[in-house]
Protein backbone atom coordinates (compact mmCIF):
# COMPACT_ATOMS: atom_id res chain seq x y z
CA UNK A 1 0.00 0.00 0.00
CA UNK A 2 1.40 3.37 -1.05
CA UNK A 3 1.90 5.98 1.67
CA UNK A 4 0.92 9.60 1.06
CA UNK A 5 4.61 10.55 0.88
CA UNK A 6 5.21 7.92 -1.82
CA UNK A 7 2.12 8.98 -3.79
CA UNK A 8 3.23 12.62 -3.60
CA UNK A 9 6.69 11.64 -4.80
CA UNK A 10 5.26 9.72 -7.76
CA UNK A 11 2.91 12.60 -8.59
CA UNK A 12 5.82 15.07 -8.52
CA UNK A 13 7.98 12.68 -10.55
CA UNK A 14 5.29 12.29 -13.23
CA UNK A 15 4.58 16.03 -13.37
CA UNK A 16 8.25 16.99 -13.68
CA UNK A 17 8.87 14.42 -16.40
CA UNK A 18 5.68 15.21 -18.32
CA UNK A 19 4.23 11.72 -17.91
CA UNK A 20 1.22 12.61 -15.76
CA UNK A 21 -0.92 10.16 -17.71
CA UNK A 22 1.16 7.28 -16.29
CA UNK A 23 0.62 8.11 -12.61
CA UNK A 24 -2.41 5.83 -12.25
CA UNK A 25 -0.61 2.94 -13.96
CA UNK A 26 2.45 3.36 -11.74
CA UNK A 27 0.37 3.45 -8.57
CA UNK A 28 -1.79 0.51 -9.63
CA UNK A 29 0.86 -1.77 -11.16
CA UNK A 30 4.20 -0.10 -10.39
CA UNK A 31 5.30 -0.41 -14.02
CA UNK A 32 7.22 2.23 -15.88
CA UNK A 33 9.81 2.39 -18.65
CA UNK A 34 12.87 4.64 -18.52
CA UNK A 35 15.52 4.79 -21.23
CA UNK A 36 14.07 1.65 -22.85
CA UNK A 37 14.39 -0.37 -19.63
CA UNK A 38 11.38 -1.81 -17.77
CA UNK A 39 11.07 -0.96 -14.09
CA UNK A 40 8.64 -1.85 -11.34
CA UNK A 41 8.29 0.57 -8.43
CA UNK A 42 6.81 -0.64 -5.18
CA UNK A 43 6.37 0.87 -1.74
CA UNK A 44 9.04 -0.12 0.73
CA UNK A 45 7.73 -2.43 3.41
CA UNK A 46 9.77 -0.91 6.19
CA UNK A 47 9.92 2.81 5.33
CA UNK A 48 6.94 4.87 4.18
CA UNK A 49 9.19 7.36 2.37
CA UNK A 50 11.31 4.83 0.42
CA UNK A 51 10.73 2.83 -2.75
CA UNK A 52 11.68 -0.69 -3.79
CA UNK A 53 12.81 -0.65 -7.40
CA UNK A 54 13.00 -3.68 -9.68
CA UNK A 55 15.05 -3.28 -12.87
CA UNK A 56 14.55 -5.70 -15.78
CA UNK A 57 18.02 -6.41 -17.12
CA UNK A 58 16.86 -8.96 -19.67
CA UNK A 59 17.37 -12.62 -20.40
CA UNK A 60 20.91 -13.90 -20.95
CA UNK A 61 21.77 -15.71 -24.17
CA UNK A 62 21.16 -19.43 -23.65
CA UNK A 63 24.60 -20.45 -24.93
CA UNK A 64 26.32 -18.32 -22.26
CA UNK A 65 23.81 -18.76 -19.43
CA UNK A 66 25.99 -20.79 -17.04
CA UNK A 67 28.92 -18.32 -16.79
CA UNK A 68 26.52 -15.39 -16.72
CA UNK A 69 24.48 -16.86 -13.86
CA UNK A 70 27.70 -17.73 -12.03
CA UNK A 71 28.84 -14.10 -12.37
CA UNK A 72 25.50 -12.83 -11.08
CA UNK A 73 25.77 -15.09 -8.03
CA UNK A 74 29.29 -13.81 -7.37
CA UNK A 75 28.09 -10.22 -7.59
CA UNK A 76 25.08 -10.95 -5.39
CA UNK A 77 27.38 -12.24 -2.66
CA UNK A 78 29.50 -9.07 -2.77
CA UNK A 79 26.63 -6.58 -2.67
CA UNK A 80 26.01 -4.81 0.65
CA UNK A 81 22.87 -6.40 2.08
CA UNK A 82 21.98 -3.39 4.22
CA UNK A 83 20.99 -1.59 1.02
CA UNK A 84 18.58 -4.38 0.08
CA UNK A 85 20.31 -4.86 -3.27
CA UNK A 86 19.84 -8.20 -4.97
CA UNK A 87 20.21 -9.85 -8.30
CA UNK A 88 17.64 -12.49 -9.10
CA UNK A 89 15.83 -14.32 -11.86
CA UNK A 90 12.14 -13.91 -12.55
CA UNK A 91 10.91 -17.52 -12.39
CA UNK A 92 8.13 -16.84 -14.89
CA UNK A 93 10.26 -15.24 -17.62
CA UNK A 94 13.91 -16.08 -16.92
CA UNK A 95 14.68 -12.37 -16.93
CA UNK A 96 17.49 -11.11 -14.71
CA UNK A 97 16.24 -8.54 -12.22
CA UNK A 98 18.24 -6.12 -10.11
CA UNK A 99 16.39 -4.80 -7.05
CA UNK A 100 17.28 -2.03 -4.67
CA UNK A 101 15.70 0.34 -2.20
CA UNK A 102 15.81 4.09 -2.78
CA UNK A 103 15.77 5.93 0.55
CA UNK A 104 13.59 9.07 0.81
CA UNK A 105 13.96 10.08 -2.83
CA UNK A 106 12.98 13.33 -4.47
CA UNK A 107 11.50 13.43 -7.97
CA UNK A 108 14.91 14.47 -9.33
CA UNK A 109 16.69 11.79 -7.32
CA UNK A 110 14.26 9.13 -8.53
CA UNK A 111 14.88 10.07 -12.16
CA UNK A 112 18.65 10.10 -11.65
CA UNK A 113 18.48 6.69 -9.98
CA UNK A 114 16.33 5.20 -12.76
CA UNK A 115 18.64 6.55 -15.45
CA UNK A 116 21.68 5.17 -13.62
CA UNK A 117 19.98 1.79 -13.19
CA UNK A 118 19.05 1.81 -16.89
CA UNK A 119 22.68 2.44 -17.82
CA UNK A 120 23.69 -0.66 -15.82
CA UNK A 121 20.96 -2.68 -17.53
CA UNK A 122 22.30 -1.59 -20.93
CA UNK A 123 25.87 -2.40 -19.89
CA UNK A 124 24.79 -5.82 -18.69
CA UNK A 125 22.98 -6.50 -21.98
CA UNK A 126 26.16 -5.70 -23.91
CA UNK A 127 28.59 -8.00 -22.10
CA UNK A 128 26.72 -9.50 -19.13
CA UNK A 129 29.50 -8.29 -16.80
CA UNK A 130 31.64 -11.24 -17.85
CA UNK A 131 34.55 -9.00 -18.86
CA UNK A 132 34.62 -6.72 -15.79
CA UNK A 133 36.12 -7.23 -12.38
CA UNK A 134 33.51 -7.51 -9.60
CA UNK A 135 34.73 -4.34 -7.87
CA UNK A 136 34.16 -2.34 -11.06
CA UNK A 137 30.63 -3.61 -11.51
CA UNK A 138 29.74 -3.12 -7.86
CA UNK A 139 30.09 0.64 -8.23
CA UNK A 140 26.31 0.40 -8.75
CA UNK A 141 25.53 0.71 -5.05
CA UNK A 142 26.63 4.26 -4.41
CA UNK A 143 24.07 5.90 -6.69
CA UNK A 144 21.11 3.79 -5.63
CA UNK A 145 21.12 4.69 -1.97
Image (cartoon, rainbow, N blue to C red):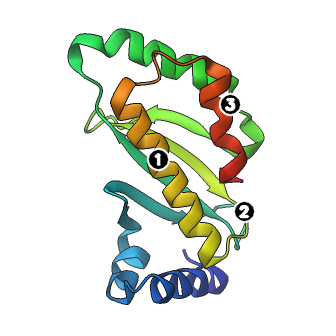
Residue sitting at x 68%, y 70%: 105
Q: Position of residue 12 (x, y in %)?
A: 55, 87
**In front of the other: label 3 or label 1?**
1
Q: Which mark is residue 56?
A: none
Identify the element where label 2 is drawn.
Answer: loop
Of pointers 2 and 3, the one earlier in the residue sequence: 3
For label 3, the crowd category at 10 Å Cα-Cα, with few meaning under 14, some 14 to 19 and many 20 or more, is some
Identify the element where label 3 is drawn.
Answer: loop
Of pointers 3 and 1, the one earlier in the residue sequence: 3
Q: Position of residue 51 (x, y in %)?
A: 61, 64
Residue sitting at x 58%, y 37%: 86
Q: Pick the residue in front: 105 or 142.
A: 142
Q: Which mark is residue 79?
A: 3
Q: Is residue 89 left or right of residue 1?
A: left
Q: Position of residue 88 (x, y in %)?
A: 47, 33
Q: Which residue is mark 2?
A: 103
For label 1, the crowd category at 10 Å Cα-Cα, with few meaning under 14, some 14 to 19 and many 20 or more, is some
Amino acid sequence: MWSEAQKNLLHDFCERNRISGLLGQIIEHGRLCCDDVAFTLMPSLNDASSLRIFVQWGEPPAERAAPIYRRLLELNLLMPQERFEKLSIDPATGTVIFTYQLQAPTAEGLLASLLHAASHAHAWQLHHFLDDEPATVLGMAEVYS
